[in-house]
Amino acid sequence: MERKIYKDLLAWKTKKDRKPLILQGARQVGKTYIVNLFASKEYANYVYCNFEYDKKIKSLFSSDLIPSRIIADLAHYKQKEIIPGHTLIIFDEIQACPEALTSLKYFCEYANEYHIIAMGSLLGLAVNRDTFSFPVGKVEFMNLYPLDFEEFLMATNNQYLIDEINKCYETNTPISEAFHMNALLLYKTYLFVGGMPSVVNEYIQSKNYELVKIKQIEILDSYFNDMSKYNKATEIPKTKMIYENISTQLAKENKKFKYSLVKPSARASEFENAIEWICLAGIANRLYRLEQIMLPLNSYKSLQDFKFYMNDVGLCCANENILVDDIIYDNENINYFKGGLVENYVNNQLIVNKLSCYYWNSTNQAEIDFITRIGKDIIPIEVKSSDNVRSKSLSVYVNKYKPTYSIKVSTKNFGFENNIKSVPLYAVFCIK
């Protein structure tokens, strides 16, 4: 599958001040696949090391961390010539060998002619930073997420639709009705399937939604297994409770995360470690409330008030046992959940586009789903799961803060009226 991060990897390879790269992301988002594809296409050869699978490789980092000695031993062990600039060295599941992680510092300082990409799903959780030195400032970071909707369109051979969507987004002109309806159907399909590569591949190969759900459940099970493997015994049940409750709370009218819905009379202090674990694992993320609309936005967020979103909408549906027909045919019995699911979808897309987002409300009278900075402007983004675009909240916000323009995301076609940019739900990937 084509991934947009490939261009970023190419840019990293050609940088003059290139450092070892750490590719982060939750389990099963495709890190190993994309790096091996990149290595096979862009380098003469590559050396792949998986520290979980091949535990003998760890011994190469047990005596010292001198790059020249590591390279010589690695070349001998793998029976491959390692050529500076022409061989990509891949350290997979690097959290299983903290010494290898520390060695990246010395590769940066003394042997930066070697190209190294390290990957790990649980780096912030599995590595004891009190014992091992994290190479702060000596590595670059990239994040890989599940396929966003644009990548889903690529995978399903809909490049023509991407081109039309981009054109209409830039010009604020409606897309043809046939394209609009087709894009909405594909968007609804994505809401159910999600963007985990193995799930998308199953959908493409079989078009069998039952098999799709089986793949999703397998991924959820792997996440729960990680919670038991890389966690304190006392935190395991709390972490599982919180994670299972994320999608449940999206079905509430008020999407703010409430500890009392996880456990009666629960307090934040009881679950703060569990929430931190989930965020560090990359399987969910928080959207904080803004107390004031002032720059820098991050300085005015409330740490007590947040919404919680899963990293993939398909897993969100699977966790709540949603049927594909519920999504495709707009089952009214899941309207509240559908609203939360759509917010989750928009949130994930904006994260992929590297936009830092927050939400805002005003004394329970108005609430804006997303506030972000686009260029120099602070832009409100209102999200509707249908074509009902009337919004008292947006009017309240506009009257109070007078933004340069506003964005309204819904099932309506493209347009620009009354200083509001109308963006169909399938075109959120254009907001950058």
Image: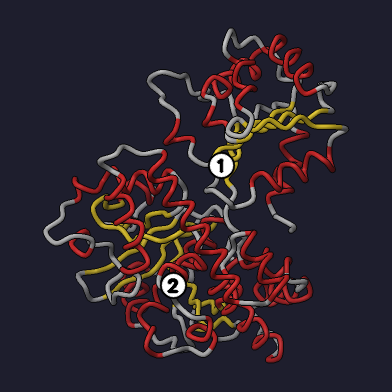
**Depth order, front residue of 216/243:** 216
The residue positioned 50% from the left and 83% from the top of the image is 327
The residue positioned 79% from the left and 39% from the top of the image is 39
- Spot occupied by residue 344 in the image (x, y as percentages of width and height): 45, 67
300 to 124, vertically: above or below: below
**Depth order, front residue of 242/298:** 242
Q: How many numbered badges does the structure rendering display?
A: 2
Quadrant of the frame with the N terminus: bottom right
On the image, numbered disc 2 is attached to which residue? Answer: 341
**Residue type at the position of mark 2:** Leu
Q: Is residue 146 left or right of residue 330?
A: right
Name the outermost residue toward the left: 265
Which mark is first along the chain, 2 or 1?
1
**Residue type at the position of mark 1:** Gln
Q: Is residue 200 left or right of residue 401?
A: right
On the image, numbered disc 1 is attached to which residue? Answer: 24
Task: Kindly tell me whether residue 147 is visible in this rendering.
Answer: yes
